[in-house]
Amino acid sequence: MSVKGKYTIGLDYGTNSVRALIVNTATGEEIASAVWEYAHGEVGVILGRDPNLARQHPEDYLKGAELATKQALAAARRNVRGFKPDQIAGLGVDTTGSTPLPVDAQGQPLAFQPRFAKNPAAMAWLWKDHTSVNEAAEITALAAKLRPQYLAKCGGIYSSEWFFSKIFHCLRTAPGVFDTAHSWVELADYVPAALTGTEHPDKLTVGVCAAGHKAMYNDAWGGYPDAKFLSRLHPKLGALRVRLRAQAHTIDRAGGGLTPEWARRTGLASGIPVAVGAFDAHMGAVGAGIGPGTLVKIIGTSTCDILIAPNSKPLADVPGLCGIVNGSVLPGYYGLEAGQSAVGDIFNWLVNYLQPGGPAKGSHEALTAGAAKLRSGESGLLALDWNNGNRTILVDQRLTGLLMGQTLYTTPAEIYRALIEATAFGALTIINQFEKYGVKVKQVVNCGGIAEKSPLVMQIYADVTGRPMKMSRSAQTCALGAAVAAAVVSGAHKNYAAAQKAMTGLKQRDFRPDPAAHQVYQQLYPLYRQLHDAFGIRTWSGNLHNVMKQLIEIRNTARNA
Amino acid sequence: MSVKGKYTIGLDYGTNSVRALIVNTATGEEIASAVWEYAHGEVGVILGRDPNLARQHPEDYLKGAELATKQALAAARRNVRGFKPDQIAGLGVDTTGSTPLPVDAQGQPLAFQPRFAKNPAAMAWLWKDHTSVNEAAEITALAAKLRPQYLAKCGGIYSSEWFFSKIFHCLRTAPGVFDTAHSWVELADYVPAALTGTEHPDKLTVGVCAAGHKAMYNDAWGGYPDAKFLSRLHPKLGALRVRLRAQAHTIDRAGGGLTPEWARRTGLASGIPVAVGAFDAHMGAVGAGIGPGTLVKIIGTSTCDILIAPNSKPLADVPGLCGIVNGSVLPGYYGLEAGQSAVGDIFNWLVNYLQPGGPAKGSHEALTAGAAKLRSGESGLLALDWNNGNRTILVDQRLTGLLMGQTLYTTPAEIYRALIEATAFGALTIINQFEKYGVKVKQVVNCGGIAEKSPLVMQIYADVTGRPMKMSRSAQTCALGAAVAAAVVSGAHKNYAAAQKAMTGLKQRDFRPDPAAHQVYQQLYPLYRQLHDAFGIRTWSGNLHNVMKQLIEIRNTARNA
């Protein structure tokens, strides 16, 4: 084994906090970890009167890098006799996204200027900011007319969560910020740049993960969308085009070395390589040991589904997929990203907003216990998992939740289970879509908070999909992926295959489908799909008269079983 | 004014209790009232392993007549100086239904025989017993083939809640009870018969209300369904036909006089006339002052809607109506009955089964307060009021509830309001159906527990329908209707018009539609109707892609208003 450095560190920027994870590059052992919760807003999220607004203050990113790293190093010293910070050979970063922030001509966030310090438009536009729905629709419409190839790679619809929608919305609603900004940078690129002193637009390294999945970057048409196209949206967007980097990179490259200033602030060695940044889900896929045929599901408040396919062969466009980007996960492979806009968030909604029976009876624990006692199908309920819209395969945020089959005796546990099942049906719809377009799913590896915490969710996913649900060994798969990237760029491993083999793995326990439950879900899924298509697809035509009756039949059969 | 007796008494048999109400026949003043809760089962309802089963023990009916009357008389003595029981000139009875009970050759309930005392099949089959779904379907299918005229008068579908469905199910599942029974009697007929000693099948007086609405009785085809038709269902049902009474009667007739035994048990005068019995909703319509063009809505756990039309003119069959029966409400008029299978029961489901936030936050009071603060449309929610199936206009118990439009922030108060709105949309659907088939609704008078208790429900009904919601003056409109019947049969008034004029009236307060809210509901109702038709009507064909989007638009407009 060619191991040069003994440890690497991964920084994982989530919605509410940043985690630093220190990993043994030879074994994948996670020797220390620390989390720092962002200081601004509501647990790091700055909200506004518009419920669609969600921003973050970039101060939290830098302060978090410093504090989480220092705390993790302190923990490593406690946990491992003889541990020294200079044994850390490299650093990797993953973040939420698309989370772009406006920067000045030096690449510094506008929010660091006193006059913009409290202006939400000058901060980072968090992935879940949904203020830019109209602009997304305009971009989609124009691309459909002039550049259909752009849409073909991002599922046919450009999302309001993405880079140019947000910038365009800023241009319209906060022109002072837009005009002051020299350019915009994704958080996944900003953090490595800040740590390596390469924020300046001429030095900035841009990762292909964010650029490709959220900003229509593709080598096939010369990088970002062309200036003519952007100018048709707005001349100032066209003018911005030349200030974006020409080339985006895969994560086997280092954006630079840690600056002496950051070495001082964190306690790490100066000059260690910092890998090109990527989104949390993509790094999570790396940390879960992704390879061809392996679907990695990162299941948290929302879900990301990542697959890869060799870039040596052409790949069909998969309608409804969030993105197909060469090199966005691993070099040499197309990265395919799908996702569900809400999963844990739907369960949280039931627990936090409805809280049936009060805090004790309405807790996740109590509802899980009740739901686990139910047989598949016996509630007679069916739900759509669209409380936060549908990312894949409909790519439509103007969709909402639905629950049906209620009687006068429907219980909270039945609803909780129906919501879990709905997200499982959504997951199956994504798998089916991949396979329909020729991307075979040979195994499913799960990670993320919900996968870690809820055996019931995992069992239902197995029963609904009819596939074993395997579990990533690490409980911090995203941060582990960033540490794997650090191991590659630091030379601890010669490539990702070697690094993943050494550092990632599966838990012994997996969840196998129960044949009887699977048989029931094979009856329920067509009903879900019928609702899905009726409410979600403009060209659908048909009748729903059968749905309630079949749910009752399935319920009665399940109860008498 | 031709007033002979000063007071009458109405006995109102509900699902959980019986009420006795003593009324001044000259003024309608309700001088005393008493309620006795049934002793058997769960608050009077005997349940089984099958959740569709709901029975009552007839002992409760007789014990209730005695105790409620005695308590009401005692209260009258306390309330009115000089009151004497012999001032009560007559008695009227209304009950739930269809609630048939098997009786022996003397007309005595089988449940009074020790060997049947604990056999649910030998008890009264409560209106909401839904064990007979299959038999109802068979009756409907056979009638559609052989006797379409039967179905034309009961909305096109014979219900599992009704007389012959229940008897047929007893024949199939409890043949020992069926074979022992000489005949079956509706509760509305049994109580007056018991009080007047006319239970014997040769003496029994049958009311046209129960017979017409629930047992396909119609003078046009010689009363009950013919023996040939019933024999095709089962020869034993055909044989039963000859043991049913040939003629059914309107409520301007007395079934007999109170027996000395019942005079002794209750304290009433022996021989006072007891009016022919009718269902609670129909007597409620009388007590609410029903006349041509007046829709009386009795809104409780479920809702009954009653209209009348002169029988001097032919009346079109109204599809989906529960029944059109000559004389079922008032002599000289067709009685038209519609209804919603659950109204208050749906709100109770939310409060009792989901209880969002716990007992205090999830109470009717708290949810009503929260819901009252919301603007029409601003929740973005839309529900179907089918948790207990749909009586009118779909006549389909194999339908279930539906809630849509949920986000990650949907609150319990929003859901509570959406459920109220759903029942209002259901109410509007019934009004529209009446008017579509030529039965004009000139005013709406409401009564019943929900109408009494919830100004919010009444205001939403006004806003949704665009019509003033008037309120019956009496809080005990059903029992008052029975007392009005008693006033007519005792000669206190010469006819119903005179008795209603003297004894019934409206509250001063009514609920007027708010134009702005009505305008919003005019946008929401077509969406409700779209769901209603898509899930409820076999021949519907179309697309629901617009529904979630329009709900979001209505929501956004309402929030910005």
Image (cartoon, coloured by chain):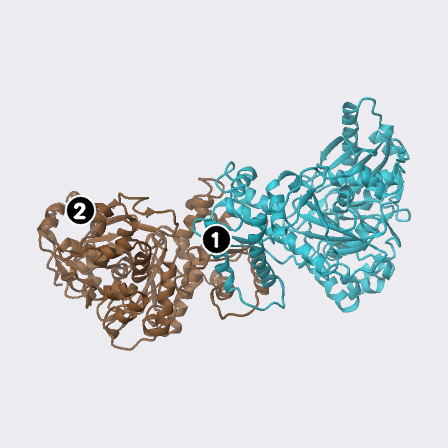
Chain colours: A cyan, B brown
A141 left or right of B360 in image: right
- Please, is residue A463 above or below residue B442 in the view? above
Q: Amino acid at mark 1?
A: Thr
Q: Nearer the viewer, residue A327 or A295?
A: A295
Q: Which mark is residue B443?
A: none
A160 left or right of B546 in image: right
* Residue shown at the point (55%, 58%) measured from the top left: B558
- Quadrant where the N terminus of chain B sits is bottom left
* Residue shown at the point (31%, 75%) measured from the top left: B315
- Quadrant where the C terminus of chain B sits is bottom right
Dot 2 and dot 1 residues touching (CB under 8 Å):
no
Residue that carries the numbered disc 1 in the rendered image: A557
* Residue shown at the point (80%, 22%) measured from the top left: A81
Q: Amino acid at mark 2?
A: Glu
Q: Nearer the viewer, residue B474 or B307?
A: B307
- Please, is residue A86 above or below residue A348 in the view? above
| Distance Cα–Cα, label 2 vs label 1 | 45 Å
Chain at tag 2:
B
Percent coordinates x, y for residue B55 in the rendering: 30, 50
Quadrant in which residue B333 is drawn? bottom left
Q: Label 1 neighbourhood size at 10 Å, few (<14), some (14-19), many (20+)?
A: few
Q: Determine if residue A392 is in view.
A: no
Of the residues tagged 2 and 1, which is closer to the observer? 1
Please determine if labels 2 and 1 lie on a single subunit.
no
Quadrant in which residue B215 is drawn? bottom left
Chain at tag 1:
A
Percent coordinates x, y for residue A198 in the rendering: 88, 43
Secondary structure beneath dot 2 equals helix
Residue that carries the numbered disc 2 in the rendered image: B66
Percent coordinates x, y for residue B512 in the rendering: 40, 60
Q: Label 2 neighbourhood size at 10 Å, few (<14), some (14-19), many (20+)?
A: many
